Amino acid sequence: MKELSVEWMLVIVTALVVLSYLFSVISRHIRVPSVLLLLFTGVGFRMLADATGTDIRFPATLVEVLGVVGLIMIILEAGLDLKIRRDKLSLIRDTFFSALIIFMISAVLIAYILNYFLTEPLLKCLVYSIPLSIMSSSIVIPSIHNLTERKKEFLIYEASFSDIIGILFFNFLTAGSSITLNSVGSFVGSLFLSMILSVVFSVLLFIILVKSTIHVKFFLVFALLVGIYVSGKLLHLPSLIVILVFGLFINNLELIPFKWFKKMFPADTVSDLRHLMHTLTAESSFLIRTFFFILFGYSITTGFFGNQDVWVTGGLIIVVLLLVRYLYLRFFLKTNVFPETFFIPRGLITIVLFYKIPAQFRLESFNEDILFFIILVTGSIMTLGMIFYKRPSSEIVEEENFSDRKDIL
């Protein structure tokens, strides 16, 4: 194993940050998601290392830690992006049910595919199918700048709900070895307790942000959020709810009707704080995404492209993801299908949840190359959708109801 000097490590780290920034700029013009460029960069580095015989390894826990921190940042960023207003209630309803129903149908069908090909217990297959059924907001949200505002809102809400729903179902299934009335009741109870704690912690963290006289306070709050997440995991509570509620709380403070609250926290102070949270969260997410996707890409070996089983199983799963999404958008939601149908990327949350699958739910015959294949192909499919969606947003007329437009397929 080759060891790099400190100087070379610093050169590589800074070069990767600059490269990631350039990818963010380039992606707006070529319509290829920047995170996908980072992923393929990592794969390229691995191929180069293999070709030159260079053996540089990174601890698996490093990728996992970056993934968990990235997961927290994604949920926080999602909360900060979600605006709760009366005129958005129909959008929130549509995107919630879109995320829920597409996720549930996809998870069940993928579980049966894994059960058929691997002949493993269906419950274990369902645990594996959940991460594969979650739309990756870490790839979707940075990739929608060329879409219209309506499409952006739809995909932001849907991807955020998909993350949250998927994580909740994953936590529920992996909390015990069987699904019983008691386990469901226990999960609902822990969810209710988490909601109560979320409100309490959100108020306390908000007071720390507003009242603290020390300028460096964002990362103090972020450290507390990480501590809350870890404590919740140790207590088997869905602690990501706390982080989501905190983000929603910050972004929707004007909904609090109490006069004493508005007097204690003036609108200009709240506005400045919200702007600061948005900026720092976006900057931190950018940094974490950069290293996570490059390191994950570096961990991928491209030999799986010659494995027929990977192509068959992974290909069937991708067909299910596309078909379920298209049918729901076309016939149930009756809304836009292009390029929304192509937004099926699997990314950071999928990878993190795979790392978190308990030993008792592991599939002995599951080939992890299937995971790599699905992540690369679904990201490429989304890229194709964005490339073929060529018209600038100012020239696009949104479809109010899909059934009124028979010509857009």
Image (cartoon, grey):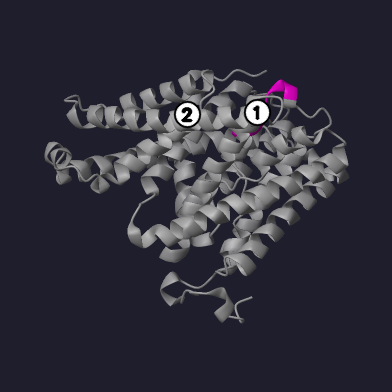
Image position of 350 with respect to 182: above or below: below
Tell me if mark 1 has few (under 14), some (14-19) or many (20+) residues whose alpha carbon lies within 10 angstroms of its own: some
Label the magenta part by its dominant secondary structure: helix
Q: In screen coordinates, is 322 left or right of 307?
A: left
Q: Residue at 53% across / 60% down in the picture?
A: 30
Q: How many marks?
A: 2
Residue 252 percent location from the top left of the image: 30, 46
- Work out which quarter of the rendered image holds the N terminus and state it: top right
Badge 2 amino acid = Ser
Q: Is residue 242 magenta?
A: no
Q: Residue furthest front?
A: 181
Q: Is residue 297 visible?
A: yes
- Work out which quarter of the rendered image holds the C terminus and state it: bottom right
Tell me if mark 2 has few (under 14), some (14-19) or many (20+) residues whose alpha carbon lies within 10 angstroms of its own: many
In front of the other: 110 or 308: 110
- The circle on residue 239 is 2
Q: Is residue 144 visible?
A: no
Image position of 88 with respect to 11: above or below: below
Q: Residue furthest left?
A: 263
Q: Residue at 26% across / 48% down in the picture?
A: 255
Magenta region, residue range: 352-360
Which residue is disc 1 drawn over? 174
Q: In screen coordinates, is 72 left or right of 46?
A: left
Q: Residue at 42% across / 38% down in the picture?
A: 244
